[in-house]
Image: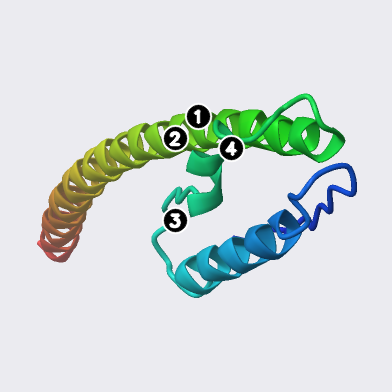
Amino acid sequence: VNLIAVVVFDHESDHHSVGTVLSREWDKVNSDVVGNETTTTKTPAFVSQVSELDCSTNSGKIICEMQSQINTLEQQVTSMHCLLKEYQKSFETINKKLDSINQANALVTTDVTQAIEKTTERIFATNEA
C-alpha cells in the first residue's frame, strides 16, 4: 500500500504547521501499513482534526476535500475487501467441487482400467483355448 503525503501551507492564517502535521501522520501510517500482508484501512490522526479546521481558507478547503476523498477511498477499500472475501469463498467452493470431480474421475479411471484388463485377460484366454 503506497500512501502519498501532501504538504499544505496556509499563508493566510496561522495554520502553517498543518503541512508538517500531515506529513508526520502519513509517515506514521506508511510505517504501520507497508510490509503487512493484511491490508487494513487506517485513517491518519489528522483526519479527525479536519472538522476543527476552517474550510473557508485555501488550505482548509484542500484539507477538507482530502478528508472527503479519504472517506470515499476507505469506503471503496472496505467494499473491495468484502468482495475479495466473497471471491475467496467462491474459489474455495469451486476447489472443493473440483476435488470431488477429480476423485470421481480417479475412481472411474480405475474401474475402466480394471474392466479393460479383465476383458483383455478373457480375450487372451479365449484365443489360447
**How many labels, in total?**
4
Nearer to me, 73 or 99: 73
Residue hosting label 3 = 39
| Residue 110, image x, y percentages | 16, 55
In this view, 128 is above or below 69: below
Residue hosting label 4 = 50
The disc label shown at residue 75, or none: 1
Identity of the residue drawn at 78% across and 30% down: 61
Q: Amino acid at mark 1?
A: Gln
- Count neighbours of disc 4 (C-alpha within 10 A) and say few if under 14, some if 14 to 19, many if 20 or more: some
Q: Amino acid at mark 2?
A: Thr
Q: CA distance from mark 3 to mark 4?
A: 24 Å
In this view, 84 is above or below 112: above
- Count neighbours of disc 3 (C-alpha within 10 A) and say few if under 14, some if 14 to 19, many if 20 or more: few
Residue 68's quadrant in the figure? top right
Q: Amino acid at mark 3?
A: Thr
- Can residue 2 be seen here? The reply is no
Q: Secondary structure at mark 3?
A: loop
Mark in the foreground, 3 or 1: 1
Q: Are marks 4 and 2 in contact (CB under 8 Å)?
A: no
Q: CA distance from mark 3 to mark 1?
A: 14 Å
Residue hosting label 2 = 78
Q: Earlier in the sequence, mark 2 or mark 3?
A: 3
